[in-house]
Image (cartoon, rainbow, N blue to C red):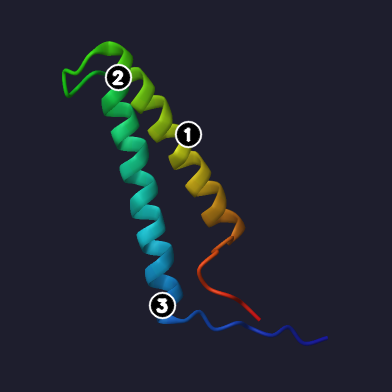
Amino acid sequence: MQTEKKAISFGKIIRITFGILMIAIYLGMGYLMLNNFFEVPRYVSLSLGILFIVYGIYRGYRLYKGMDYTIKTK
């Protein structure tokens, strides 16, 4: 049996890189909000911190599973 190597396009590399960057930003913002870095009321910083972290984890899961809703694959 021969295994076929799939070529990774430049566009896919850019999407993956952008996805990883956005995950890092969401998780970093969540961390900063939980530590009240921006000195907003505590209920706001907790709410937004948890929201950012949960969304960053969700984006990481989507990136890991390869679920890209904007591009149809064959």
| N-terminal-most mark, 3 or 1 | 3
Quadrant location of the N terminus?
Answer: bottom right
| Residue 23 as seen in the image, left or right of residue 2 | left
Q: Residue 30 falls in which quadrant of the image?
A: top left
Q: Amino acid at mark 2?
A: Val
Tell me the tag on residue 54.
1
Q: Residue at x 52, y 43 (%)?
A: 58
- Packing grade of label 1 (10 A; few <14, some 14-19, many >=20) is some
Residue 37 relative to residue 67: left or right: left
Where residue 48 appears, as percent x and y from the top left, is 34, 27
Which residue is pictured at 50% across the width and 68% down the height?
70
How many neighbours does mark 2 have within 10 angstroms: few (below 14), some (14-19), or many (20 or more)?
Answer: few
Q: Is residue 8 above or below residue 50?
A: below
From the image, tell me which residue sits under label 2.
Answer: 44
**Tag 3: Cα neighbours inside 10 Å, few (<14), some, or many (≥20)?**
few
Compare marks 2 and 1 and give the one earlier in the sequence: 2
Spatial CA span between label 2 and label 3: 37 Å
Q: Residue furthest right?
A: 1
- Say which quarter of the image contains residue 73: bottom right
- Say if 14 sits above or below 48 in the image: below
Q: Residue at 53% x, 73% y: name it.
A: 71
Residue 63, image x, y percentages? 52, 56
Query: Which mark is in front, 2 or 1?
Result: 2
Q: Nearer the viewer, residue 55 or 8?
A: 55
Amino acid, disc 1: Val
* Secondary-structure class at tag 3: helix
**Residue flagged by tag 3: what amino acid is it?**
Gly
Mark 1: secondary structure: helix
Which label sits in the foreground, 3 or 1?
1
Q: Residue at x 42, y 30 (%)?
A: 51
Identify the secondary structure beneath mark 2. helix
- Judging by the rendered image, the residue that carries numbered circle 3 is 11
